[in-house]
Image (cartoon, helix red, strand yellow):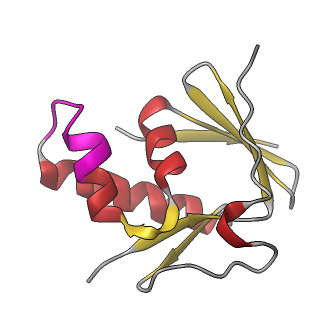
Amino acid sequence: MKLYVARSPRIAARMLGEEMLVMSGQGSTLFTLNPTATILWKAADGTTPLAEIVERRICSEFEVKSEEAQRDAESLAQDLAKHGILLISEQPISEQPIAKTGAPVQEQQQP
Amino acid sequence: KPRFRYEQ
């Protein structure tokens, strides 16, 4: 079973160092993702399977077994989805409620 | 491990 993940269009995000700050429009909640979670977050385009993201972006760069990395990524995705800032589907997520391809998400690098 | 924290 393939899992697809996409950033919710109802958030705003920006990089701060190697971490991603995500502000949810609902509930005034500020999320801070660590560098590994940030890599997964940035790759969550809705069309690349999560397993493929993990292999390409995590296993190729970090000293970790594939099974562990996959398990951690799925756990993270489930947790972020519970908070409403990540969408998870067994089908590619091409259409989003507000705009396509996560356009509302602005990632700004600190000067 | 990928982690996150959050605050109101």
Task: Locate residue A19 relative to residue A30 in the image: left or right.
Answer: left
Q: Whole-percent x and y of residue A34?
A: 51, 32
**Taking A100 as reference, is A32 above or below it?**
above
Q: Is residue A65 visible?
A: yes
| Residue A87, percent from left and from top | 58, 71
Q: Is residue A7 left or right of residue A64?
A: right
Mark count? 0
| Residue in the picture at 34% in, 38% down | B1
Dividing the picture into quadrants, the one containing residue A11 is bottom right
Whether residue B3 is visible to the viewer of this picture, yes or no, is no
**Image quadrant in which the C terminus of chain A is located:** top right
Residue A62 occupies quadrant: top left
Q: Where residue A14 sits: x, y (%)?
A: 72, 35
- Whether residue A88 appears in magenta in the rendering, the answer is no
- A106 sits left or right of A17 in the view: right
Q: Where does the magenta region start and end?
A: A55-64
Q: Measuring 36% from the left and 62% from the top, which residue is drawn there?
A: A74
Which residue is found at the position 26% from the left and 83% from the top?
A1
